[in-house]
Image: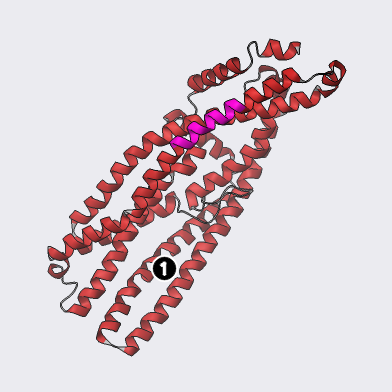
C-alpha cells in the first residue's frame, strides 16, 4: 500500500497528468521529421544488408510491376467486349473473353506473389530487429541496459515492446511498402490495400494514360480532388496518432498494475483487504476507456473522410468522362470514329481514370498503417 501511495500520490489524477506530460514532451504521435527519422533508423535495423535482403525486396518490386502491367491489360479488355457485343461479333467476343480470363489469372497470381514475398521479408525483418533489441537490452559497459530501463521507467513494459511491437513494426512497414495492411491478425496485415511502390508506379502510368486520352483537365481534376482529402486527412491523422500514443500508455499502465497486484496478492491476503488495489485498477481502466472514446471519435472522422473519398470516386469518374466526351477530346485525338469504337473508348478510359483515382486512394489510405507505425 505504501508503494502504491509513494509512486502514485493521488492515484488516477497523477497517472493521467503524467501520461499527458509524456505525450506533450515527446510529441511522438505526430507526423514530423524526427518521427520519420526514428522510423528510418528502426527500418535500417530490420535489414542485415545481405544479398537475400536485396533479392527479397527486388522480388516484391518485380511482382508489383507485373501486377500493374497485367492489371492494365485487364482494364482494356472490357472495351473490346463492349465493341464485340455492339457489333454482334461472336469471334471477337470469344477472343476478348479469353484475354480477360488469362489477364485476370495473371493479375491474381502476381498479387498473391506480392503477399508471399512481403510476408517472408517482414518475418525476416522481425528477426533482425528483435536480435538487435536483445543485443542492446542485455548489454552495457558496467550495468545492463535492461536494469537502467526498468529503474528509470522511461519505457513502459519493455517486454511488450520487444515481443509485440517489434513483431508488428516490420509487418506494418512491409505492408506500407508492398501493400496488404488491411486485416488484423497475428502479423497485423492482410491482403487489402496497396503500398507506396504500387502507388508510385500506377500514379505515373495512369496519369500519362489519362492525359493521353482526355487531356490535362481530367488529370488536374483527379489530383485536385485528392489534394483536398489529403489535407483533411493530414490533420485527422496527427490528432488520432497522438491519442493512440496516450491510449497505448494507459493500456500499459493498466496491464502493469495488474501484474503488480498479482505480485502482491500475499500482502493483500495478509491484510485481508484489496480495496485500495481495486480502486486503483478501476481508475486505470476508467482512464483507458475514456481516452478510447476520444480515439473512436477522431478515428471515425478519419474513416468518414476516407469513405467519402472512396464512394464518390464514381461521381468524379463520370464527371471527368462527361467533360471529355462533350468536349470531343477522344474524337479529336482519333480514338474513335464510329459508335462501337466510342463505346470501347468510354469503357477503357473510364477504367483507366478510375485506376488513377484508385492509385490516389492508395496514397490516402496509407494514413491508417502510417498512424499505427
Q: Secondary structure at mark 1?
A: helix
Q: Is residue 57 above or below residue 228?
A: below
What sort of colour scheme is used for the picture?
A: secondary structure
Q: What percent of the width, then of the height, locates residue 32?
A: 42, 30
In the figure, is residue 179 to the left or right of 327? right
Counting labels gives: 1
What residue lies at 30% left-to-right and 63% top-to-bottom? 352
Q: What span is in magenta?
A: 286-298
What residue lies at 29% left-to-right and 88% top-to-bottom? 89
In the figure, is residue 328 to the left or right of 281? left
Residue 2 visible at all: yes
Residue identifier under label 1: 70
What residue lies at 63% left-to-right and 28% top-to-bottom? 285
Q: Is residue 1 above or below residue 76?
A: above
Answer few, some or many: residues within 10 Å of disc 1's Cα (few below 14, many 20 plus, some between 14 and 19): many
Q: What percent of the width, then of the height, locates residue 230?
A: 34, 42
Q: What percent of the width, then of the height, locates residue 8?
A: 66, 14
Q: Is residue 127 magenta?
A: no
Amino acid at each position: 500500500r505504501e508503494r502504491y501511495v509513494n509512486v502514485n500520490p493521488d492515484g488516477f489524477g497523477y497517472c493521467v497528468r503524467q501520461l499527458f506530460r509524456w505525450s506533450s514532451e515527446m510529441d511522438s504521435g505526430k507526423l514530423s521529421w524526427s518521427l520519420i527519422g526514428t522510423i528510418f533508423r528502426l527500418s535500417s535495423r530490420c535489414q542485415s544488408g545481405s544479398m537475400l535482403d536485396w533479392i527479397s525486396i527486388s522480388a516484391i518490386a518485380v511482382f508489383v510491376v507485373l501486377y500493374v502491367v497485367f492489371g492494365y491489360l485487364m482494364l482494356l479488355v472490357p472495351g473490346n467486349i463492349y465493341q464485340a457485343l455492339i457489333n454482334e461479333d461472336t469471334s471477337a467476343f470469344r477472343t476478348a473473353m479469353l484475354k480477360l480470363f488469362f489477364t485476370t489469372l495473371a493479375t491474381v497470381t502476381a498479387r498473391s506473389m506480392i503477399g508471399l514475398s512481403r510476408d517472408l521479408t517482414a518475418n525476416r525483418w522481425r528477426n533482425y530487429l528483435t536480435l538487435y533489441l536483445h543485443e542492446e537490452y542485455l548489454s552495457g559497459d558496467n550495468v545492463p541496459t535492461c536494469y537502467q530501463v526498468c529503474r528509470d521507467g522511461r519505457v513502459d513494459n519493455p517486454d511488450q515492446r520487444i515481443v509485440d511491437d517489434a513483431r508488428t513494426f516490420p509487418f506494418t512497414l512491409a505492408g506500407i511498402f508492398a501493400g496488404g495492411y488491411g486485416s488484423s491478425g497475428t502479423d497485423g496485415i492482410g491482403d487489402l490495400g496497396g503500398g507506396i511502390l504500387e502507388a508510385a508506379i500506377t500514379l505515373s502510368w495512369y496519369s500519362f494514360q489519362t492525359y493521353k486520352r482526355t487531356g490535362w483537365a481530367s488529370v488536374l481534376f483527379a489530383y485536385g480532388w485528392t489534394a483536398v482529402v489529403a489535407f483533411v486527412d493530414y490533420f485527422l491523422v496527427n490528432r488520432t496518432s497522438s491519442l493512440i500514443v496516450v491510449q497505448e500508455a494507459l493500456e500499459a499502465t493498466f496491464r502493469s498494475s495488474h501484474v503488480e497486484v498479482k505480485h502482491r496478492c500475499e500482502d493483500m491476503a495478509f491484510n485481508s483487504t484489496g480495496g485500495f488495489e481495486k480502486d486503483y485498477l478501476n481508475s486505470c481502466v476508467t482512464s483507458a476507456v475514456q481516452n478510447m472514446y476520444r480515439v473512436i471519435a477522431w478515428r471515425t472522422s478519419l474513416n468518414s473522410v476516407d469513405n467519402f473519398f472512396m464512394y464518390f470516386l464514381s461521381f468524379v469518374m463520370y464527371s471527368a468522362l462527361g467533360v471529355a466526351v462533350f468536349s470531343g477530346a477522344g474524337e479529336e485525338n482519333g480514338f474513335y470514329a464510329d459508335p462501337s469504337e466510342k463505346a470501347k473508348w468510354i469503357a477503357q478510359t473510364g477504367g483507366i481514370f478510375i485506376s488513377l483515382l484508385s492509385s490516389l486512394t492508395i496514397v490516402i489510405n496509407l494514413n491508417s498503417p502510417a498512424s499505427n507505425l
